[in-house]
Image (tube, rainbow, N blue to C red):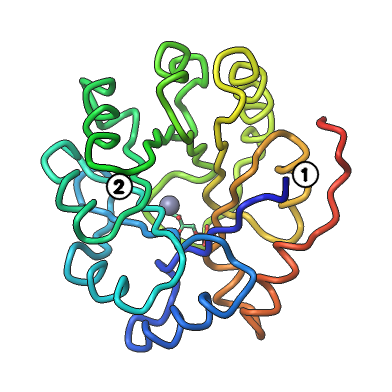
Amino acid sequence: MKHILAPSILTADFANLRRDIEMINDSDADWFHVDVMDGVFVPNISFGFPVIRAAKKYAKKPFDVHLMIVNPEKYIEEFASAGADGITVHFEACTHLHRVVQQIKAAGCKAGVAINPHTPVVLLKDILHELDLVLVMSVNPGFGGQAFIPQTYSKIKELRQLANQVNPSLIIEVDGGVNIGNIAELIQAGANALVVGNAIFAAENPSQMISDLKNIPVNSQTI
Ligand code: DX5
Ligand code: ZN
């Protein structure tokens, strides 16, 4: 199956958000990646419920909401009602991760867990069978446009091996510094959902870049 391409609206032009949403609607992209930052879990603040609700009015593809916030359990139901189709919380932000995952599912959303670059994949072993998605951060979360951390390749391979045993349909999503130069290798390593922000919105023709990222040829043999 072809990989899922999820443009991050963090790098969109917020003064022209409707225009950028419609560009994504009309493109080969699969999801909208929606980055929520609280200024506590990460050193940046992005946007919250009013912006998500406004964007949802025009978006015609699922919302993949990435919560870079502390205490995400306080807001799961509100993100679901604002339009989230999937909600991903950070492993590092949840003391009772299992409970939060059940809460996301009970709210009717796909459940994801994100791991920061320093967090070993093996720490997800006892939660993996409960998850729809694992998001492997390939930069330190907080900002768009950062450089990709190469250690991500081995993390994806290790995670795919682990998932093959307990949850073969797990979606492995990679987020941060993904571009036309590394996307094929990430898919070969075992990723099947790719978040792309800067490489799309800084491109001369964002819609064409989405098409190139979606239709990139990939050697089917996993590395
Ligand atoms: C980073 C965010 C990412 C970011 C990706 O904290 O989680 O989703 O927007 O953007 P690029 O592709 O610019 O690294
Ligand atoms: Zn993200």
Image height check: is 37 above or below 209? above
| Left-right relation of 155 to 42 | right
Image height check: is 70 above or below 15? above
Image height check: is 27 above or below 177? below
Name the residue rendered at 23%, 69% in the picture: 53
Q: Quadrant of residue 185?
A: top right
- Which mark, residue 185? 1
In the rendered structure, which disc, 2 or 1, sits on the residue that comes first in sequence?
2
Q: Outermost residue toward the left? A: 74
Image height check: is 129 above or below 153? above
- Which mark, residue 144? none
Residue type, numbered disc 1: Glu
Quarter placement of the C terminus? top right
Front residue of this view, candidates 135 and 77:
77
- Horizontal and vertical percent for residue 50? 17, 70
CA gap between label 2 and label 1 equals 26 Å
- Horizontal and vertical percent for residue 65? 35, 52
Front residue of this view, candidates 26 and 218:
26
Name the residue rendered at 39%, 59% in the picture: 63
- Horizontal and vertical percent for residue 120? 50, 20
Quarter placement of the N terminus? top right
Confirm if mark 2 falls within 8 A of ligand 2. no
Q: Residues within 10 Å of mark 2 (few under 14, many from 20)?
A: many
Q: Do the numbered discs 2 and 1 sit on residues whose CB atoms are within 8 Å?
A: no
Residue receiving disc 2: 67
Q: Quadrant of residue 188?
A: top right
Name the residue rendered at 15%, 52% in the picture: 78
Residue type, numbered disc 2: Leu
What SS does tag 1 mark?
helix
